[in-house]
Image (tube, rainbow, N blue to C red):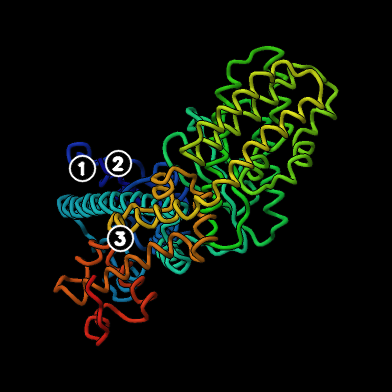
Amino acid sequence: MKKVFLIDDEMIIRKGIANGIDWKEEGFEYCGDAPDGEVALPLIEQCKPDIVITDIKMPFMDGLQISRILREKMPSVKIIILSGHDEFEYAREAIRIRVTEYCLKPLSASDLLHTLHKVSAQIDKEQIQERKYNDLKTKALQNLSISKDKFLIDLCDGVYSTSDAIKHASELGIDIIASYYFIVIIESKQLRSIDTDWIKEGYTCLTFWKNTKEKVFIFQGTSLDQLEQAATNIRKKMQSREESICFGIGKIENRIQGISLSYAEAQEEKSYARIIYKYNKQATGDDLQSKKELHHSFNRKELIQFLKFGNIGQIKEFSKSYSSYLQTSTIHSPLLYYYFLMDFTITITHFIKEMDNDSGDVLGQIKDKEMRASWIREYQEVITYMEEVLSIVIGSRDQTNSKYGTIIQKTKEYILENFADPKLSLQTSAAKVNVSASYLSHMFSNETGQTLTEFLTNTRIERAKELLKTTNDKTYEIAYKVGYSDSHYFCHSFKKVTGMTTKAFKNSGEIIPIK
């Protein structure tokens, strides 16, 4: 039911219109009237009518003046002007103000009703159009949000080259260009009900939900010191929170391509944290407090990095550094030593299982050492235990360095067999050869001189070149066959790699050898 408000300086006209129409029967609500625009304005703001009927010539504030104000303050209100002045200037000004209807007096009740119904129908039509527009806008925003999340997920998975990442980010209105980046991942079954906005306060940060219990933050900055401080602060705050949250923080990278590496490292740290959390979850009372203090005293990520890249000669120094909390702590109890060594051993065991399928012998040796951990009473015994376990792991790792070639070869074979899969990425390749994504990324780059993403792109483009020369397939069909779900993206990548468009290449004289 549309609300109607009347403005006219003649009381007899106001009463005549107010009483001469069965408003409810006609589908309207007569919500008030006033003798001039000045008196009418606060009443209109209060009752918020859909339609305002106003005379032109009135004292204090006339119809055109109130119409200008209403058009600015309440643009959706429809205005019907009643005028006894059949003059061009009045009509022209009414049009300029975008008055809905301009009627000449005298006006019968039936004529006014006809005009009101006409305006009411216009309101209904506009409301329907507005709802459709809002629905489309909402859907578009939802699709854009999905597209943005999909892009950020693919970016973290290492799907894009630098130029392609910048191009797609620009199309989605995302600014990904920065001097430095690092990733934070948090995970909890109750994550939707936990406040996580504090993590990004004061920093430039892109966020997305990987799933219902995992949220990812891509931090950006112009200063290495700034992001190092951010990572340190986040780690301290996360460790001091009471909620059961597992988290991982990747190292700071200075290239867009490094985002996927930082993401892989953050995922890796989070997976270790989850293992330790399950172990610690059984603790209660004093045990729990001891574990909390110990958990906050060191950065497990340091241990993982040492397991990957440390050497035999650094074991003694690392053991002292990593366990320094035990030496400086006011608590010197066998229980604290035991918790520390269990955390240390579980982290190493998880690392070995991720790094090497054929790890039974090494795990057996560590298990033998672990059996005597509960008997350790002195700090020096802790150091000895650490040195012995690390010597086993680092020694085994060094002996298997020759496996790099085998792992790289298996990775290349997997890519050559599955490049047509649009979902193929660093993560899926790492899972196939049973190593972590960060480990494979580091190894692949060192051994081949190119990133895994670059190798995958080149493989796809080489196959596309063959298809362009040997088939009559359309461009979008070839794009699909070589692993691109977006033909425009395929054409962009093809030109970037070859320096030619697909059409120009097809018509060129370059010969593709038949394999």
Foreground residue, 292 or 244? 292
Query: In which image quadrant can residue 96 be found?
Result: bottom left
On residue 81, the disc is 3
Q: Residue at x 26, y 70 (%)?
A: 464
The quadrant in which the C terminus is found is: bottom left
Residue 126, percent from left and from top: 25, 54
Residue 503 figure quarter: bottom left
Residue position for label 1: 21
Q: Amino acid at mark 3?
A: Ile
Rendered-image quadrant of the N terminus: top left
Is 115 rendered above or below residue 513? above
Find numbered disc 1 in the image and state the secondary structure of the residue it sits on: loop
The x, y position of residue 257, in whole percent, is: 51, 61
5 to 271, vertically: above or below = below
In the rendered structure, the answer to whether residue 387 lies left or right of residue 246 reads right
SS under mark 3: strand
Q: Nearer the viewer, mark 1 or mark 2?
A: 2
Q: Is residue 225 left or right of residue 54?
A: right
Is any part of residue 37 visible from this angle?
no
Looking at the picture, which amino acid does disc 1 mark? Ile
